[in-house]
Amino acid sequence: MKKLAVVALGGNALLRDNEKGTIEQQESHTNDTIENLLFLIKEGYDLIVTHGNGPQVGNILMRNDAGEQLYGITQMPLDICVADSQGGIGYMIERIFRNVLNKYHIKRNVVTLVGMVEVDPDDPAFENPTKRIGATYKIDQAKSLEKQKGWHFKESKKADSGWRRVVPSPIPKRILNLELIGELARKGNIVITCGGGGIPMFFDKENNIRTADAVIDKDLASSLLASGVGADEFYILTDVSFIYKDFGLPTQEKLEFLDYNDTKKYLEMGTFGEGSMAPKIIAAMRFVENGGVKSIITEASKLEDKSYGSKITMKYPS
């Protein structure tokens, strides 16, 4: 049986921080990323691709806000905005994937699934919203919106730049349609799903689906997906080729190969950036804990460069 890999696109896979995020820019970066993923396809892997949506869903929320203020258009809730971003980004990745496959005369079906992810409505994250989303407001605007809509705000991370809405980021519990996703991938179809961590939902007492004003960490959801479908390998593609110990400090050290115990030790010591690399490390470790063969954190352009030693491997202790 072919190996199955789940690849989480992040970092500079779709756009760069210093760009406006035009469709031309996003398509160009997506094309470059998919060209690098061909290495896995040529090696015979079955493939599931997930992706982030932070900048894109933020833009959707700002369009929501502008439409309401300028034209009185009713804002759509966060779950609809996440679904919109899943559909738009998934469509872009699928279309470009099909064109790259055509370029190299490779026959594979590509399918995009807008997906929901179950969370616990009693998750402590709902009592402590921390994830900043959408536009930046002045403090009087933020207070007004808190009263009107019940939103929560925190001061922006950038000094003196204003206040932003914050929402919970609960732990993902279950990927809906998991068996179907795995079945499609095992039959050779390239599946794009779980965009932006998935649409957060939960079941009420009547077993009806209810949505949550929240966002799910994309890497944690991707790790859960990879474990659930029994993937052999889990890749997190970001904007750095290596994991570094004490990144940016005089004691900085490249960590090329890590076993599970060393990774856990470094994580507990606070070696990895709390808001940047640490969540990726946690996602990678959970995949290995749940029986995955290895997790790899690297830059897309380094996937094929085996001699450069750019892949980070963590093997669970036997």
Image: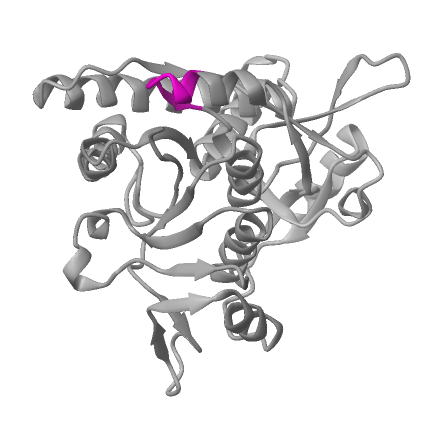
292 to the left or right of 22 = right
Quadrant assignment, res 108 = top left
**What residue lies at 61% left-to-right and 38% top-to-bottom?**
216
Quadrant assignment, res 164 = top right
Q: Position of residue 94 (x, y in %)?
A: 31, 19
**Residue closer to the observer: 295 or 84:** 295
Q: Is residue 186 magenta?
A: yes
Quadrant assignment, res 144 = top right
Could you tell me if residue 34 is visible in this image?
yes
Q: Which residues are magenta?
A: 184-192
**What residue lies at 53% left-to-right and 15% top-to-bottom?**
180
Q: Is residue 180 above or below residue 175?
A: above
Q: Position of residue 121 (x, y in %)?
A: 81, 33
Q: Position of residue 49 (x, y in %)?
A: 39, 31
Quarter of the picture containing the N terminus is top left
Q: Position of residue 299 (x, y in %)?
A: 28, 52
Could you tell me if residue 84 is visible in this image?
no
